[in-house]
Amino acid sequence: MKLFLLLCFIIFSQLVFAQTRVSGKVTDTNNNPLPGANIFIKDSYDGISSALDGKFDFTTEEEGDVILIVSFIGYKQVELPLTLTGKKIELEITLEEEAKVLGAVVISAGAFEASDENKAVILRPLDIVTTGAEADIYSALETMPGTQQVGEAEGLFVRGGSAAETKTIVDEMIVQNPFYSSVPDIPSRSRFSPFLFKGTVFSTGGYSAQYGQALSSVLVLKTQDLAPDTRTAINLMALGLGAAHTQRWENTSLAFEGGYYNLGPYFEVQKQRTEWKKAPESFEGSLNLRQKAGGTGMLKAFASHSYSELSLFSPNLNDLTIKDFFKMTSNNFFFNTNYRDILGEDWAVFGGYSFSTDNDNIGLTTDHVTQNEQLHTGKVTITKNVTANSFLTFGGEFQNIIYKDVFNGFQFMQNELYLGGYIETDIFFTNDFAARIGVRAEHSKLINKYNFAPRLSLAYRLGQYDQLNFAYGQFYQTPTRDFLVYTQDFDFEKAAHYIFNYQYIGGNRTFRIEAYYKDYDKLARGTVYTYPYFNLPVIPFSSTGSGYAKGIDIFWRDSETFEFTDYWLSYSFLDTKREFKNYPSIASPTFATPHTFSVVLKRWVQSITTSVGITYSFATGRPYFNPNNPEFLGDRGKNYNNMSLNVSYLTTLFDSFTIIFFSVDNLIGYNNVYGYRYSDNGKLRMPVLSPALRSAFIGMFISLGKAYPF
Amino acid sequence: MKSLSIFVLFILITSSLYADDEKYTKAMKKNISQIDSAATVEEIINTANKFERIALAEKDKWLPYYYASFMYTLASYSETLNEKKDAYLDYADKFVITADSLEQNNSEIYTLKGMIAQARMQIDPMNRWMKYGSIADNAFKRAIELNSLNPRPHYLVGVGLFYTPEQFGGGKAAAKPHLEKSFQNFNEYKLENDLLPNWGKNMVEALLKEIE
């Protein structure tokens, strides 16, 4: 009987359950309804999605103390304790946006980013390859505002700065020589293939305290992670041939690459203005290892070696009956290894070491020079989440630069040890307002000086797609070696940046306008034998140079208005003067011009699976030195015009995915003059020109055995 | 008396266990039946939310995570804004990773991983095919390796080829054998229980019709 009662009770209690009705509305912090939010009782099936007006209404059979969860994409989840008694519950729920999600403010003053991972970026990795004629990182970036068109030298000349003021950073570590050794007045290519990198940040000023030794600009390159699959590729070019094989295992990938390039046959076909004795010829090889460790660790190692040879004649303006001879053989080795990991919830660590050695053996008409430069560098960076809305980054680096120079038997050596440390914090005060505050301290053994550089960057979001940015920072750089050879009695060269920017990135349209002021101080001065400024007073060595640069950079990109067509426009206005090196007075330097304009247009033609890109650049004439003009650098060169074309045809040949690439630089054949060289008496002059009026490139890149790219 | 009480206890326990399982099956069946009728992004997200609720309450069952992920992948196809598409696929990724940790080496889960990569690629094919193309390719290969009778990876490989230009080895002719293999599998494949993924047959038929 007792048992029967018990049974009745159990069955009864299972049948009669209380139902509670829960209803209400979900809104964001601006009181806009949020449809599609998931509202439910934790550990039960009971719940509902909010309707178009944000309202919800459901009943639950749960009883007692429960937790109500409200979640929605891009918003912070809300957990609400409720007591369910059968009485109706009415709720007003406000969801707060998650920090750092799409649409949240991004610290971006001064920087152009190309990445697949971040969504709010200005460039895509592919843009680097399909812009300009050369498929070269640096020439693609010359279509960004803030850069100058300097046809006779390699490197990025940013906002009135010289190429030496821009540093290239690969996986957090500085690269001493990102270009092949160059010949005077002929720019050399970058040594790194754009395909090595998954992300590029090109900062034209106001960058993070993580980077030093650059007065104007940093180019931060992040290498690829594990290769996606095993593949073999063959490259056939008019200039040479190459092959690559990548092997992919579960947690490891290893790639070999080799190439041989000889410009000789091409120079036979394409008439050269430069009188080559031996056209550039080079051998290259590289090894690239990726190893995943644990769940979150990634070990990378990259090594490359190249050997190149060339020689040429150039006219001697002081005696037209003879020609100057120049011959160079170069050996370059580069190694970079690093490890990155996430420890626990809040810590991320990075450690890296890089070594490079560059050997140039130069034979001149009467002189012989060998140059060897070695760099050992190491860096450690630690990032810690401090609160949900802030994180701290700190670390240190060393650079040991050993330079050896033998000039006709006279040996010269230099050993620099540079140490840098930094600490920086990123704080998201709200979803609309963020700050990055940092300091960097540096020491150079050679000049025996310290510096202390504060950096600040602020970002304020105006609407869903646009924001205002401000950046300020002090930047230091050790004077270049050509000065330190004579005396080490120098201070760090210094620049202060002030940047104000408005940026709109919405859908497929980007607009950016940035105004800046740059104040140069303590620039190295002095007369160095390599400068062609004769008849000028000899300037004693000192750190008394100074200058300024101010201007406006404008960028517009649109891939939406015209179908299959993507274009961008950039314009830079620059006003800069400086007194440095052996300048007898303050003047606009030879690498700066007031107006620079570029248009890049890309179109994908589906019917012939071909991508066509056209790049047009214009720049007003740059100052050049004329010994007959009493005003120093008072002459201005011709305006610069260049239109280049690149065409990529994608197809399948012999069951292998193939890209046929064709490009022409200076399509219209505009005769650009980059300046003039004068004879010692100032009576004769010779224009500085590119080695050929036009240059063309044709190549075929084949992925063996992969019929389709997917 | 004692044996009776044990018997009652046994009934009570098994019935409550059975009731739990029945509740899960019933809720899943009901939600699965709604997948096809969810057409707008809102309806798809609502269905995803339902699977997510079950997933979070059950915790150790892979299927609700699988379906939540699948619904978010579908949502990305129906969405028009690229930024939102990626946000939906971030969710799809999150759920499929949990499903994979609960049920390892499952052909359906690898198929879904491939499908998510395909959806990522479609957002910006020019820039993304190198990365996501091979992720999708590898996931489908693995899915077929794990269960060659599964019709869905064959279908998705076929779809990928169907929309790839002929110059790259795609096109209708290249897609056809994969779609036919998928169709054949759909006819031969026996579902072990009706909660398991069973989508795609009508889509294969529609594509095959378009080819002929």
Image (cartoon, helix red, strand yellow):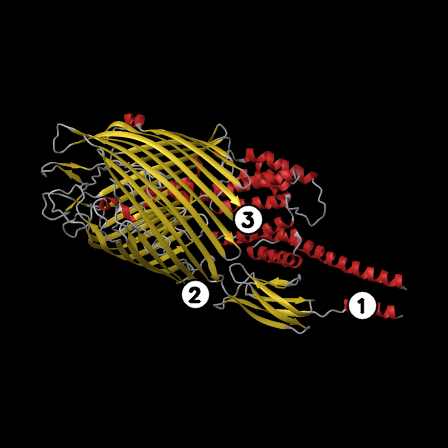
Q: Amino acid at mark 1?
A: Ile
**Chain letter behind tag 1:** A
Badges 3 and 2: C-beta atoms under 8 Å apart?
no
Which label was assigned to residue A10?
1
Question: Which is more N-terminal, label 3 or label 1?
Answer: 1
Badges 1 and 2: C-beta atoms under 8 Å apart?
no
Which quadrant of the structure image shows residue A401?
top left
Please tell me which residue is depicted at 39% across the width and 31% down the height of the picture: A259
Which label was assigned to residue A429?
2
Q: Picture coordinates of residue A506 (x, y %)?
A: 41, 55
Question: Which is more N-terminal, label 2 or label 3?
Answer: 3
Q: Is residue A286 left or right of residue B159?
A: left
Q: Are marks 1 and 3 on the same chain?
A: yes
Mark 1 burial class by Cα count in 10 Å: few <14, some 14-19, many 20+: few
**Depth check, front residue: B144 or A604:** B144
Residue A178 seen = no
